[in-house]
Image (tube, helix red, strand yellow):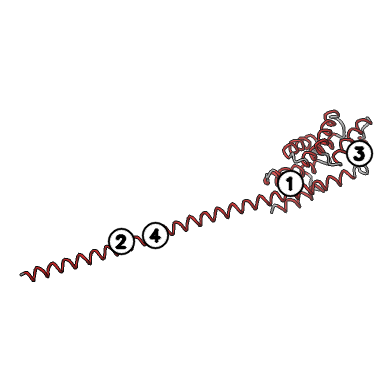
Amino acid sequence: MKLKKSHSLLIASSALVLSLGANHAYAFEDEDARRAILDLRSQLRQAQQNNMDLNNKINNLQQQISQLRGSIETANHQTRMAQQSSQQDANPDVPPSQQVGDPNEQQNYDNALDLFRQGNYAEASTALNRFAQQYPNSPLTPSARFYEGSSRYANKDFNGSIQGLQAMVAAYPRDQKAGDALLVIAGSQVELNNIAGAKATLQRVVNEYPNTPAADTARNRLELFR
């Protein structure tokens, strides 16, 4: 009887040990699964962080490209303005039929333009604005407003340049410098990182002044943004 009881206890003990062993094994398996999930989550967070870092680098590169384009635009504009101003004496802005009659008027304009040619852009913009206010009906006023806006651009007053040149184009849409004024506006928009605005302005040059050198320049610059 005692032997039978001992045998029953042994069987029960063995079953308990096996049950505990199985539960312990399951516990290990659950812990491994939890660790694997935590590892996967950690890897996912790292991948997301890496993706954010990559996006930031791409954005920084795009900004650097825009700034470089703006610098190229500035250099090109200054070169073009220097070439145009050096041709002023040989190719006057005003047709012979519209030449000014007041010698002081012409002299004041020439003096203001000389400041631009010499690279004194802050003084030039002031002098050209003064001329335009003093002689609002002069045939030289559209040109004065153009070089005033160009002076502000060269002096990195991009918002002031845009505002002044937009007013110039609105007041004198058929002036021979209207297309060039829009090119300067586009350059200022690039400097302000308004790429969409610059594209729209360049397209306006192409649409409104299609058979001009300004339109050719606008087409070339639009290619840079593609």
Q: Which residue is mark 1?
A: 202
User: For the residue marked with disc 4, what is the amino acid?
Assistant: Arg
SS assignment at label 1: helix
Vertical order, 64 against 99 (above or below): below
Comes first in the chain, label 2 or label 4:
2
Q: Residue at x 72, y 53 (%)?
A: 224
How many other residues sit within 10 Å of disc 4, few (<14), some (14-19) or many (≥20)?
few
SS assignment at label 3: loop
Comes first in the chain, label 3 or label 1:
3
Residue 45 spot, x, y in % from top left: 48, 55
User: For the residue marked with disc 3, what is the amino acid?
Assistant: Pro
In-front residue for pair 150/54: 54
User: For the residue marked with disc 2, what is the amino acid?
Assistant: Ala
Question: CA–CA distance between discs 1 and 2?
Answer: 70 Å
Label number found at residue 35:
4
Label number found at residue 27:
2
How many other residues sit within 10 Å of disc 3, few (<14), some (14-19) or many (≥20)?
few
Comes first in the chain, label 1 or label 2:
2
Q: Which residue is mark 3?
A: 95
Comes first in the chain, label 4 or label 3:
4
